[in-house]
Image: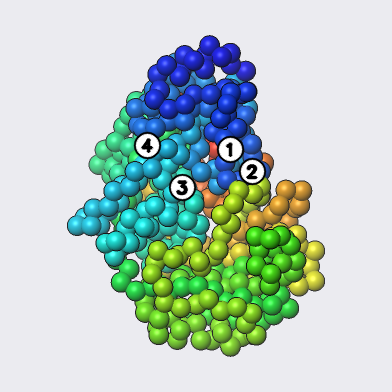
Amino acid sequence: MYKSATVQRLAGRLSGPVLGPGDDGYEAEVAGFNQVVLHRPGIVAGVRNAEDVRRAVGFAAETGTPTAVQATGHGPSRAIEGAGLLINTRRMKQVTIDPVAATARAEAGTQWHQVVEAAAGHGLAPLNGSSPLVGVVGYTLGGGLGLLSRAHGFAADHVTALEIVTPDGRPRTVTAERNTDLFWALRGGKGNFGVVTAIEFRVFPVPRFYGGGLFFPGESAAEVLHAWRRWTRSVPEETSSSLALLRMPDIEQVPPFLRGGLAVHVRISHLGPGDEGDHLAGPLRKTAPVLVDTLGEMPYRRFAEIHNDPTFPIPYDERTTMLRELDRGAADDLLSLAGPGSDCTDIVVELRHLGGALGRPPATASAIDHREAAYCLSTLALPGSRPAHVVDGMAHRGTGRSYLNFLAGPGTAEAAERGYSPAAYARLGDIKARYDPENLFRFNHNIPPRAKSF
């Protein structure tokens, strides 16, 4: 544990707060959205700008201090404890939209709802995910599988520039033409290569948008799942969707019709007008009795209503695998693991339809390695349950890869290798050795520096 003098040494360099255990404000500064991992660093630095980041990382480099980064804390994997530094970027929230270039620039602590709101004024939208509160940078560095992804691809496919402080304390600008090895690695390699202080990416026209969901009773899970998997084979790339088996706790924050039982939720996002969306959704509406129907044309800024992700901090374990296909046998396997009558305890078991632009390589190659998968399976479980039960049970249907943005909780830090092909993982390890040979940035889905062979 650091002495207060060491805390003060760093505090003298930064404009933001620098705190140690026991200091007023420490608990709030280290807290993240997902409370399954609780950081207890010797020092937490609440940075306000890129210069604060540079000085904090420089301190870590000088002192050999292992370092973690947190903006919102939605996907933690390993807690930083004792002699370590946590850099909290949540104060860095400036967003700029260039409507002529159709790009956005977001600072390190920006959440997606801020970018969506800023872009909406120009009739544009980013490739965000389902939650308005997730951090832009962490989501994008992990790939970024979102509501418009079948039409446009992973969010990382459309990054045009990154500003980063690498573990040696140096600020760098990273593009397809400049620091090209980092440009490849950062897009999919998560937080292994330093602290991204700002990110620039393309945004897209959304003249009309259709979204929402259909809730069905749990006893109709088989009919709905099979109907949805057949439906996904024919929908256009403008349509992204997922199906979730929900076992919500009986608490006030959950709508009464979802409490304490099994329900099926089909979530739909469609780039198009309401009549077109209703035509597409028609077969699903006829599958089984509908408990609640929220589908309709809406402004894209209301995207959070589609999944209705939690807006209050909770502890949860998240696991994932990428599926080759979802044929009848695979769907039946999932029903036996998580459907009616199973012993599943996960509060969410979700299948996301991939394909479309997600299956095509971007103009500039990246570390993202999921383009052959047809569906993404993810689960969300409360602590104390069996977080990997469903995912492990479906492993024989998988590609052998994981989508790291849907991995959170104890035991997931070592899972990074499953996110990449052997060649991509080796290349990431080589780049890690070049920029972070001491693995200072290791409180993440860690890619260790690759040892040189002679």
**Displayed quadrant of residue 298:** bottom left
Q: Where is mark 1, residue-wise? A: 31
Q: Is residue 183 left or right of residue 134?
A: left
Task: Tell me the distance, in whole angstroms, between the alpha carbons under discs 2 and 3.
Answer: 16 Å
Q: Is residue 13 left or right of residue 35?
A: left
Q: Where is mark 2, residue-wise? A: 35
Identify the element where label 1 is drawn.
loop
Question: Could you say which is closer to the camera, residue 50 or residue 444?
Answer: 50
Q: Where is mark 4, residue-wise? A: 197
Question: Could you say which is closer to the camera, residue 206 or residue 436?
Answer: 206
Residue mark closest to the camera, 2 vs 4: 2
Label 3 Cα neighbours within 10 Å, binned few <14 / some 14-19 / many ≥20: many
Residue mark closest to the camera, 1 vs 4: 1
Q: Is residue 115 above or below residue 329?
A: above
Identify which amino acid the numbered label 3 is placed on: Gly
Task: Tell me the distance, in whole angstroms, between the alpha carbons under discs 1 and 4.
Answer: 20 Å
Task: Tell me the distance, in whole angstroms, between the alpha carbons under discs 4 and 3.
Answer: 12 Å
Q: Where is mark 3, residue-wise? A: 135
Examine the rendering and report whether any part of residue 198 can be seen. Answer: yes
